[in-house]
Image (tube, helix red, strand yellow):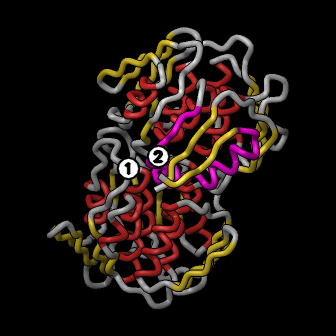
Amino acid sequence: MDKLIVHGGTTLKGSVNISGAKNASLPILAAALLTAEDVIIRRVPDVSDTNYMIQILSALGAEVERSSGTVRINCSNIGFDAPYELVRKMRASICVMGPLLGRLGKAKVSLPGGCVIGDRPVDLHLKGLRALGAIIDMEGGNMDMIAPEGGLVGDEVDLRGKHGPTVLGTDNIMMAAVLANGTTIIESAACEPEVVDLANFLIGMGAQIEGAGTRRITIQGVEKLHGVEHTIIPDRIEAGTFMVAGAMAGCKENGITLNRVLEEHLIPTSEKLIEAGHSVKFNAEGTSVTVTPGKQPKGCNIVTAPHPNFPTDMQAQFASLFAVTPGISVIEDTIFPQRFMHCAEMSRMGASIKVDNGTAVISGVKQLSAAPVMASDLRASAALVLSALTAKGSTEISRLYHIDRGYENIDEKLLQLGANVERVRE
């Protein structure tokens, strides 16, 4: 098992390229199951989550070739049983349910695993698939599904959940509906950029989809889909994480520059960094951004909410920024109220954070101190890396496999920016 040692106090400068979006890659890889023809997907990040998804596709019978971020998949001869030993490793594996049901008329998928960041039930996925006619039997930790004779049938599905729309649920129903008979309308759909990217991939395969990126998506079922070539959008969470790194440890004159970004996907992160007193400047095309630390940073308040509001996947990183920002900052997570496990580890480094009922109150300190810390989930691990960059001394971060789930070569990218980090075996 790997751990990361971060020697704090170095200044970041230079530029890095942002990888393709992990959260767009996973459902798009699964969507390859919808056609017997070749699909080619570019800029698939080399992270453990995409590796698991590719293993699941291979276990289902897909032929997969991967080289330098490009994945070619052929699903001309596939089965319907997704193996437990792979599915249990990643929650997003449930997004094979929709395409398997849509194309084969049946699916057997184990209940998934993934990060432990609070209650993330699959009931909305099942509700949506049942609305399309699927018969689902839950037994022994497996979800056995079968479509009615003649295939799934379009219907109106409301995916409103306790903490807002479900992204993977929207993905799943959209993939199931593209080959269903008739019209499917998804109300209270998630409108994250990753959902739009999946819709664009499906449209490239011949699907008829309108409204992706809004709360109402309409899908007119078609008889079959064909192959396509597609490039994954940039990862807005990786970009946001490095933007925070620039605000915390960037060169005071020139900051750091991130290439391969999309400005419209980074508006909430950009606005909060500017509000906190830092400089954020995009190029004319909105594909590159330079972040420079502010001379007089200040705390501010964040409330996470579904897109286009502030993303829950960025609150841990901003907790690191606010921990060393003068004044009081407040972060409320309305999506995953239990997602504050990083705060206890940051407190070991000297952060002043009080967490209560889904809200963290952070009193900025001048500097954190190195300490052995443990990653508890993907974004929490990123927050610990950010805290370690400016901490006094050398911080050891254990359970690095959490960060490897969603950040491609994060240690190499930090080294490229001048950080002093090393990956070692525990």
The residue lying at 53 percent from left, 13 percent from top is 364
The foreground one among 180 and 33 is: 33
Asked if residue 220 shows in the view, the reply is no
Label 2: few (<14), some or many (≥20) within 10 Å?
many
Question: Is label 1 in a helix, a strand or a loop?
Answer: loop
Q: Amino acid at mark 1?
A: Cys
Q: Residue at x 62, y 49 (%)?
A: 410
The one nearer the camera, 179 or 49, is: 49
Instruction: Name the residue carrying label 2.
Output: 378
Q: Could you tell me how far apart the alpha carbons at marks 1 and 2 are, in whole angstroms?
A: 7 Å
Determine whether label 1 and label 2 are within 8 Å by CB.
yes
Secondary structure of residue under mark 2: helix
The amino acid on which the numbered mark 2 sits, given as a three-letter code, is Leu
Magenta span: 394-419
Answer with left or right where residue 384 lies relative to residue 108.
Answer: right
Give the residue at x 58% y 10%.
Answer: 326
